[in-house]
Structure formats: C-alpha cells, structure tokens
Image (spheres, rainbow, N blue to C red):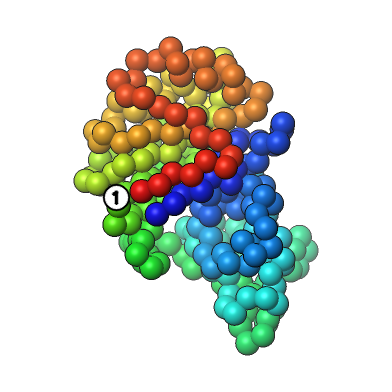
C-alpha cells in the first residue's frame, strides 16, 4: 500500500496544504490532477473542521458527471450530521446527495462505527475515537504489508493507546503536533498536542512503529522541530511533508 501525503500542515502558508491523505479532504486535494480526482471513490474524514473538509465539496463537483458511481464519504455519525446541517445544505454548497449524476447520486454518506473495520479491496479501515474539540477519529489502515494509524488531529486520549498497542503488525504512526511548547495553553483549549505533550503520549506507545509528525502550524513549525529534536523519545521521528509517500 502507498500512503500519499497531499497536505499535512496545520494551516496554509508558503505552499503548505492542510490535511489530505485521502483520509481528510483539506487543501491538499488541490494538488491532484483531474484524472486523479475522478479516480477517488472513498474519502475518510477525521472530523468536521474546515482545514480537513475544505476541498470536499469541490472534489464532488469537479468530477460530478464523469464518475460511474457516487463518491462515498466515511466518517463518524456526528461528523456527517455536521456536514449535513452546516455544509451540504444548499446554503453553503449543494446537497450533492440529492443530485443524480447519470443513474446515481453524486455523493453518499457512510457512518463509521468505532472499532468496526470497513474492507475496501485488500485494505481495511477502522475508526479510533480521539479527543479534540469536536467528535474526531483517527484511522487504523490495515493491509497485507502491515498496519498504520493516522491521527491528524488529537489531544491526550487514554483509550487511543490501548487500541494502538493492540495492533500487532503496526508499522507506522502518523500523529499531530500542532503548536510549540510556548503555546501549550492553546493546545489545551483547541485540543492539540505540542512537543512536551507528545513526549508523554509517545511513552505510551508499546509498538516499534515509525512515528511521523504532521499538522504543524506554519508559524510554529521551526520551533516545533527544535523542541522535538531536544526530546528524549527513545525512537526516531520524522516530519512528513507534502508529496511524501509511505509504503507498506
């Protein structure tokens, strides 16, 4: 499996794009060609915040009458309810679920039940609830080569580590670090991690997985890098950037 990073920043600046890995639909989707956009059948959303859904409606609209089946958006029920009420409501964007393209609706919603995997081809994807300011999921992506967990937005979450440590073949953990330590109060208020919080959290990781960091706010990125370098994590970490590919 190839996990392609389309956007992994916490905001936009200096050609950075917000979360899009074909988990989430931030501004990173704008880096794809029309053919690549048309080929997307499933999108898994972590939560409803704008930096993670910014390009979703445009993704549907771009290939509206070129697809042979609906684009399916998978997310927690609470996330889908928010999209129904506040986004796909004919006031912000059309409700593409009510628009027939060919012989099918342009868009479908599919609610994820935490811990219940959905199989797509040779991969299965399961939602893992995490703490943030709105209902939010990380995702466990399992394939024949091993497993990975992607947590684009989260703060300290006890149950998350129990689930992660139960993944015997875990090879990669992608986790956020949004702000530097000087803004730890923002992290507490906004449901994010900073390096000092990350250090405590990663001590709870019992698997020898590669750890990759994402969702750095551009204004904090360089300070985050310095602070992470000074940590005693007992394992290497890497900072993902737009265009990176993780192969499993």
| Residue at (67% x, 58% y) in the render | 33
Rendering coords of residue 126 (x, y %): 37, 56
* Residue 155 in view: no
For residue 234, side relative to residue 151 (left or right): left
Few, some or many residues within 10 Å of mark 1 (<14, 14–19, 20+): some
59 is higher (above) or lower (below) than 209: below
For residue 187, side relative to residue 130 (left or right): right
User: Which corner quadrant holds the N terminus?
Assistant: bottom left
Depth check: give the residue in front, 204 or 78: 204
Rendering coords of residue 147 (x, y %): 32, 49
Identify the residue position indicated by label 1 in the image.
146
Q: How many marks?
A: 1
Rendering coords of residue 135 (x, y %): 49, 49
| Residue at (54% x, 68% y) in the render | 41
- Name the outermost residue toward the top: 230
36 is higher (above) or lower (below) than 27: below
Q: Secondary structure at mark 1?
A: strand
| Residue at (43% x, 34% y) in the render | 212
Rendering coords of residue 208 (x, y %): 26, 34
- Name the outermost residue toward the right: 91
* Residue 104 in view: yes
| Residue at (57% x, 42% y) in the render | 243
For residue 80, side relative to residue 147 (left or right): right
157 is higher (above) or lower (below) than 163: above
Depth check: give the residue in front, 64 or 133: 64
63 is higher (above) or lower (below) than 174: below
């Amino acid at each position: 499996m190839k996990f392609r990073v389309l956007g992994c920043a916490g905001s936009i600046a200096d050609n950075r794009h917000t979360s899009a890995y074909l988990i989430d639909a931030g501004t990173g989707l704008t880096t794809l060609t029309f053919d690549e956009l048309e080929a997307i059948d499933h999108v898994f959303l972590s939560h409803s915040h704008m930096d993670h859904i910014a390009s979703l409606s445009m993704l549907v609209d771009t290939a509206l009458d070129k697809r042979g089946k609906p684009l399916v958006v998978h997310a927690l029920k609470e996330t889908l309810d928010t999209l129904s009420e506040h986004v796909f409501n004919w006031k912000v964007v059309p409700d593409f679920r009510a628009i027939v393209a060919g012989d099918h609706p342009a868009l479908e919603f599919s609610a994820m039940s935490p811990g219940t995997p959905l199989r797509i081809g040779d991969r299965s994807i399961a939602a893992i609830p995490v703490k943030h300011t709105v209902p939010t999921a990380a995702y466990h992506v399992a394939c024949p080569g091993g497993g990975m967990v992607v947590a684009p937005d989260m703060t300290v979450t006890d149950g998350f580590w129990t689930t992660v440590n139960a993944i015997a073949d875990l090879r990669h953990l992608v986790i956020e670090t949004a702000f530097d330590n000087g803004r730890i109060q923002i992290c507490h208020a906004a449901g994010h991690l900073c390096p000092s919080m990350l250090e405590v959290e990663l001590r709870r990781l019992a698997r020898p997985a590669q750890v990759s960091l994402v969702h750095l706010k551009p204004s904090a990125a360089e300070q985050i890098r310095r602070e992470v370098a000074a940590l005693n994590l007992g394992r290497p970490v890497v900072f993902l950037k737009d265009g990176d590919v993780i192969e499993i």
